[in-house]
Image (tube, rainbow, N blue to C red):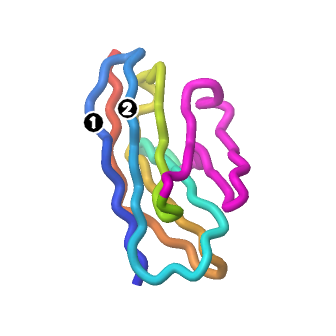
Amino acid sequence: QVQLVESGGGLVQSGGSLRLSCTASGSISSISAMSWYRQAPGKERELVANIASGGTTNYADSVKGRFTVARGNAKDTVYLQMNNLKPEDTARYYCNLGSWPFDYWGQGTQVTVSS
């Protein structure tokens, strides 16, 4: 069974930074991509950023230039460096691991940005 554990969320002022971490454990045959999603109250879950096994990255337009996704030295770890945070970034952030044909999710970590 695969488990994902996120950490690094918290309360930060507008313009501040946070670094989220996600570590996967369990039996993982191969990873196609690791992603970060977020969901704000009353809104749908949206893709923030992802990184494919080959290193290709993809970002939501709203975070381009501010957020950076990266894999750790251990292939089952992914980070999300978030700079110049804005109040509209407030949400619960979820880690996702794609290992075809399965999709795994963490429990999420709360990020709150005060104005």
Task: Look at the picture and state if 60 lies above or below 75.
Answer: above
Q: Residue at x 56, y 36 (%)?
A: 68
Say left or right for 55 vs 109.
right
Q: Earlier in the sequence, mark 1 or mark 2?
A: 1
Q: Position of residue 29 (x, y in %)?
A: 57, 82
Q: Which residue is mark 2?
A: 18
In this rendering, is residue 94 above or below 4?
A: above
Q: Position of residue 53 (x, y in %)?
A: 67, 61
Q: Is residue 51 one of those drawn in magenta?
A: yes
In the picture of the structure, the residue carrying the numbered disc 1 is: 10
Say if the magenta span includes residue 35: no
Q: Quadrant of the N terminus?
A: bottom left
Q: Is residue 100 left or right of residue 45?
A: right
User: Magenta residues, as a range?
Assistant: 45-73
Which residue: 47% across, 19% down? 84
Q: Position of residue 4 (x, y in %)?
A: 39, 66
Amino acid under label 2?
Leu
Dot 2: element:
strand
When asked about the image quadrant of residue 108, the answer is bottom left
Task: Give the label, 1 or 2, closer to the camera.
Answer: 2
Residue at x-position 53% and y-position 62%: 75
Pick the front one: 99 or 72: 72
**Where is 115 relative to 2, above or below?**
above
Q: Amino acid at mark 1?
A: Gly
**Residues marked 1 and 2 touching at CB (< 8 Å):** yes
Q: Residue furthest left?
A: 11
Does dot 1 land on a helix, a strand or a loop? strand
* Quadrant assignment for the C terminus: top left
Q: Position of residue 94 (x, y in %)?
A: 44, 54
**Res. 10 image quadrant:** top left
